[in-house]
Amino acid sequence: MNKNFMYGIGAVKYKDFVVGYIEKGSFDLGGQKPEAAKIEAEQAPGAPVLVIPQSNGSIAPTFSVIQMDYKNLHALLGGSLHYKTEDSEKKNPVGWTAPQTAILMQGPWELSLVSGQSVLIPNGTLLSNLGGKLTLTETAKIE
């Protein structure tokens, strides 16, 4: 493996939670390019005499999680989990109720890549919703 290239999503983690399977072709780093103001002068044609940084670039990943177990629904969308009464340790959820209000999750994210590198996002924000189609050719997903 050549470590000079970054490729392939191995795992996506929010805090210490591995979010599950990501839909093939859905992961996009997104974001914005850095911006700068270029100051030009009549005496220096063809090149700016000063470049003033305006904003840093940003990373704004988007992806779809297709592993729809109850723990993923709860971790990525909020709401509440339901357990059998005999499951006193609350290890195996048997249901999920969606939240009544939108949730905003902020914290550290890590993208572990197949190529061996990791991309750390120290303070990422997650806004997600339930999407997809319930057909025999597609799955529901968390977008």
Image: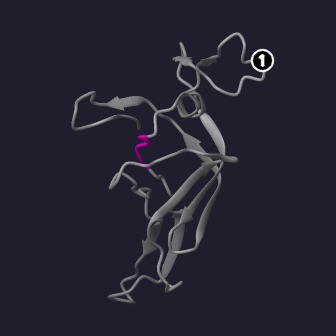
Q: Amino acid at mark 1?
A: Ser
Q: Residue at x 52, y 45 (%)?
A: 20
In the image, 105 versus 32, the foreground residue is 105
Is 106 drawn above or below residue 36 in the view shown?
A: above
Badge 1: how crowded within 10 Å, few (<14), some, or many (20+)? few
**SS for dot 1:** loop
Q: Is residue 98 above or below residue 138?
A: above
x and y percentages locating residue 64 in the rendered image: 40, 43
Quick one: 136 or 10, which is closer to the camera? 136
Q: Is residue 103 magenta?
A: no
Residue displayed at 59% across by 31% down? 71
Q: Position of residue 96 (x, y in %)?
A: 54, 18
Compared with 120, 126 (above or below) is: above
In the image, 4: left or right of 43? Answer: right
Residue 24: quadrant of the picture: bottom left
The magenta segment is 62-66
Point out residue 7 in the picture as x, y percentages from the top left corner: 44, 71
> What residue would you read off at disc 1?
88
